[in-house]
Image (cartoon, rainbow, N blue to C red):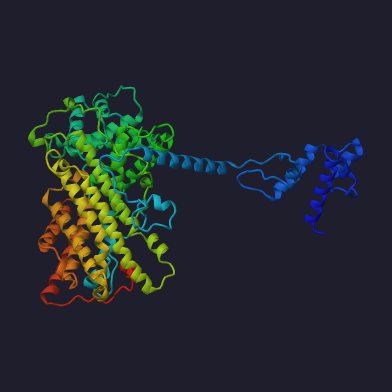
Amino acid sequence: MSKKRLRWKHFEGGASFSASTEGDPARRHNGPWKRSRNQDYEQHISVSGSRMPTNRRVQIACQSCRQRKSRCDGVKPSCGFCIRQGWECAYSELNLPDASTLSIFHRIESLEERIVSATARREKEPNLGLQDAPYRSSQTGVRVAKFGIRDLMLEMPAKHLGSAVQVLNWPVVNFLLPNSDGRESRLDPIYPFYVVHEKQDVSPVAHIEIFPPIGSDWIRLYLTYFMREVYCFFPVFDGLDVDSLFHLTSDADVGSDTHLLLNVVLTFGALAAKDKVDDERERIAVETQCWNAAVLLFGKTALASSVAGIQAAALAGFYCGAQGKIFECLKYLQIASTMSQIFIKRNNHTETAGGFTHSFLCTFWCIYCYESDLLSELDFASSGLSWYEDMIPYPSTVLDPMPTHLYTPLLASNSTRQQTVLEDVAICQIVTNSSFRKSINRVNATIYSLDVENADYTGHSTVTRYVDNCVWMVKYAREFEKHHRAIQERIPTYMLTSPPNLEWNVNRLQRRKSAFDYIIHRNFIDYAVHNPDRLTADPLRDEILEYCRRGLEGCKHFIESLAATQINPLTGTFSPGMANLTMVSVLLVSKASNVLTAVLPDGIDTAINSGIGTVTWLAARYPSFQWHVDFLQRLKAQVDKRQSCCEPLTVTHKASNIFDLIHPQV
């Protein structure tokens, strides 16, 4: 007889003995007593002459039953003995889950509570003002049925296909620009930014002090430059924050995060005052000293995750981006993003609906937009900030006005703008930029993400995948165009005019609209250029060509908008420069393609020349863009040569399906 059978015989014998004591006496003599294998029980019977207590027999039965029904969460399964007797199982020395398991349970409970609270909050809030279009509405036809949690929160994918690297490595580009030996080469437009071309103008520092030993007049001057030249693009403060910075002194009883914030603001203000003050050496000394103090304080305040620390890390990233230090910029933005996530988790249960401070909301969305702009061109993993985009509301109207009376009067020659940006306009600027940026992120996560493609089309034949992808692309284009129109209809008219909005802010907003048009329709241009034979027989040919025309129009408008106004380096030049490079390349390739000749926009040659001129201007200021100038000039020369010779563009490598289109086999 097996051990399992013997064990249950032991339990049955114990059950009959106990039942005869507590319940029906007749059950005691129904059969012969079966000797137990428990020696303690036998010894207890022989010595004391009494039966083993019922509770101990219950514990033995339950403990043996638990050995067969062990569960990691510590739930106590009921054994058959207790069920028959109608008793509650009693476990002896039940082992509790370890610390790591308990931590996982607590995180799951916290996540469930946040999801429930966020759902209830969205149901109660009215749909007013500038809101996102119903992108995740069940009424839309967008297919997102195989990803679980990713369907609800589409973050920026770590490896997406909407960057400039993919366009510059299209088969047609490699066909036009082969190596000297005729082979295709992998082009990397990001590599030049890894190289440090020149050192920044710095002043020698004998020692570092946490609080800059400069006079109050200097502090007020550079704070004024920051508020007039930087705040209008990154409005991360409210009136109380600005007032406290103007009145902060070295003996003030404040935390190190406030001193860190002051040092970063003064550093950024000194950079904004470049070539605008009389003593340039003094300005460089202030910028260098304040930045060294800020770097020293970052190690102390990074774990605090206060609002002031988050603002300081964000502004430090914007400051590095203004200098063209892309990877250092991304480092500080990732720090600010991590601190923001810690702050949200820490205050999610204590803060009421919409109870996060105004300055934190503004800082959150500024980080979100800037980091997403960088990650749209860099193949780096996202910090995860986009997972909270539906939890954090947009900032509302400011209640505390800015203390403009504290600003130092600046001469017209010392400031690029005398107009002080209105608080409401600055807030609306954050909302509109964030709305477009969220939409572009969803396009990258939906159309240009590897995961979506592989999950939707695994196991299909080539022909089925080709037909499905054509319909799939058109379907998504229709949905995203509706989303785009919904955002445009909600933009106030004063946001697109200057004044009251600043000219550069209007330009940035127009470029985001054009970039949205381009990224929605770029895959159609890719498909048409590399598959002219398929396009001719495609039943959706006319609609695909119309989408190609809209994508080319978006490229043209983006390039013209960027060239129409002098670029402001304080807002960063990497993202617009890379987007300009990509769109000029798309226009050149489309110009060389016979399929897209009928849908080319008017003035395409002017737009191409303007785009090359913009990259040339960037290369004069940031040597990392010199590679991009050479690339565009070589590509333009090849396209002009083929057009002058009337030589048709025939790509030797044709993609067999949409995956090869998006992933060129180089």
> Considering the image in quadrants, where does the N terminus appear?
bottom right
Residue 228 locus on image (x, y percent): 17, 35
Residue 516 locus on image (x, y percent): 24, 54
Relative vertical location of residue 556 with respect to residue 247 in this rendering, above or below: below
Find residue 490 and report its image quarter: top left
Q: Residue at x 21, y 29 (%)?
A: 402
Find residue 624 and report its image quarter: bottom left
Q: Residue at x 14, y 52 (%)?
A: 561
Picture mark count: 0
Residue 644 locus on image (x, y percent): 10, 74
Relative vertical location of residue 409 with respect to residue 19 in this rendering, above or below: above
Front-lying residue, 601 or 234: 601
Relative vertical location of residue 380 with respect to residue 547 in this rendering, above or below: above
The answer to whether 42 appears left or right of 613 in the picture is right
Q: Is residue 44 visible from the viewing direction of this image?
A: yes
Front-lying residue, 47 or 158: 47
Residue 463 locus on image (x, y percent): 36, 74
Relative vertical location of residue 648 with respect to residue 553 in this rendering, above or below: below
> Considering the image in quadrants, where does the C terminus appear?
bottom left
Q: Residue at x 91, y 37 (%)?
A: 47
Find residue 456 and report its image quarter: bottom left
Q: Is residue 285 visible from the viewing direction of this image?
A: no
